Image (cartoon, rainbow, N blue to C red):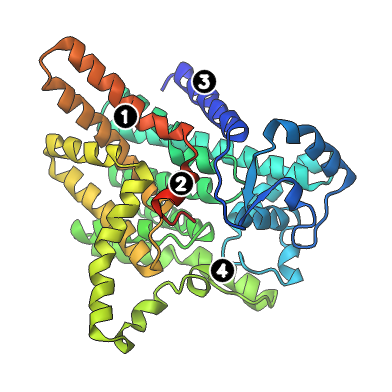
Amino acid sequence: MTKKILIFFILAILAQAGYSFLVPTFGTSDCWKDLSALNNYKGHTYSSFDQDLVGKVYGLVGNYHVVCDAGGFVLLAHDFPADYFRGRTLFINRPLYPLLVNLAARPLHLIVNSYSMTFAAAILVNILLFFASCVLFYRLAEKYFSPKTALISVILLIFSPFAHSWLVQPEGNILGLFSVVAALALLDDYVSRPTRARLMIYSLIVGVTFLVKMNIAISIFIFFLAVYGRKFKQGAVFFLLHLVPLALWYLVAAKWWGLAFGVQEVSKFGAGVWILALYKQPLYRAVGELLAAVPNFFTALFYGFLGLPVILSLVGLYKAAENKFYILYGGLLGSFFVLMFALHFYLPRHAFLVFPLVYPLAVAGIETVAAAIGNESARKFFIAATYFLIIAPTFLDIFKLYEYLGVIYS
């Protein structure tokens, strides 16, 4: 990877961030707050510095809204971990993002200890994490496809609806994206150079991602590959070790600090619990839930990418004609299906996290279709038009589109 590519990634990400502030996308529910409404949010009022700064930028980004979870994360990051002891333990099982923001904000707080500085630190953390995600994604795609495919895939990621929606939100979706591609990069490195030390260290690192969100999809995917490759011992070691970080955090928060420890995915969405209650339901309802699961998942996948990349990835998958890609693609999709089935919540932003395979295979699919077009002018037009259709949604108000289509997005 050259310096020119790295500089290009940085400039493209900054361009996306700037555009996302100037032309934001947000929902119409009460969960979205404009900058003025954040004053006195959960009892926290703006300082004079915050009020002055908001007044200066409001005319420039007056339409920018913060999702309610992001407001909660800023408060938690500003006073981490003290905010937990005020009884606000909704994100008690998600300490990693507010901790990172808190650390990033400390130098800024030397200038002025304000929520504005904490907010700025959160956006900086998002940009750095997104840049790291792009670098890791490029290296993986370059290894298994080509430098050209890797570069185009990263461009599609940077100018995706997901990036436009969440890059400028001070909450954990960008860290969740980084966690997925980082886990895949560690998995790839372990497969290339398997040692006992790497297995143990990488398992613990993947386990740390549980402190972002309870994203069991990557855990399922890695365990699935271990079973498929008949690496039962390694799979068992991974499964046990990757639970250690969450267990240690539980001991600190619940046993040492005496805080009420809950899992938001269970308390809010009933993750897993609803499955156990199926036996109490009439048979037709239980069967209906199971039958609806697959179409609900693929609907979320379709809207996560707005359709075209998913369709083209299937073309690229067929053209690849390599068993490993079928296993990886099916395994990753299946793992996220299990996650969303357990959540009983099928969100496009969760389904989008299969991008490490969808985008490179979509690029391969475009090349496959283009190669079948005999006329050179028509071929170039097809390529240009296809990439335009894939990137164009980043310039749409994607949440308004979701609302119009009746899609649940948060």
Q: How far from the left and from the top, in percent, is residue 109?
A: 81, 43
Element at label 3: helix
Which residue is at a point 67% across and 54% down the rendered structure image?
A: 71
Residue at label 2? Answer: 177
Q: x and y percent of residue 107 in the render?
A: 77, 40
Q: Residue furthest front?
A: 404
Label 3 or label 4, whichever lies nearer to me, is 3
Spatial distance from mark 2 to mark 1, Cα to Cα? Answer: 19 Å
Q: Which residue is mark 1?
A: 142
Residue at the extreme bottom of the image, as rendered: 280
Q: Nearer the viewer, residue 84 or 155?
A: 155
**Whether label 3 touches label 4, CB < 8 Å:** no
Name the residue at 77% across, 48% down: 115
**2 or 1: mark nearer the eye:** 2
**Among all residues in the image, which is located at the extreme right?**
48
Residue 223 visible in the snapshot: no
Type of amino acid at the residue the image marks with label 3? Ile
Where 71 sits versus 269, above or below?
Answer: above
Identity, as a three-letter code, of the amino acid under mark 1: Glu
Q: Residues within 10 Å of mark 4 (few under 14, many from 20)?
A: few
* Mark 2 closeness class: few <14, some 14–19, many ≥20 residues within 10 Å: many
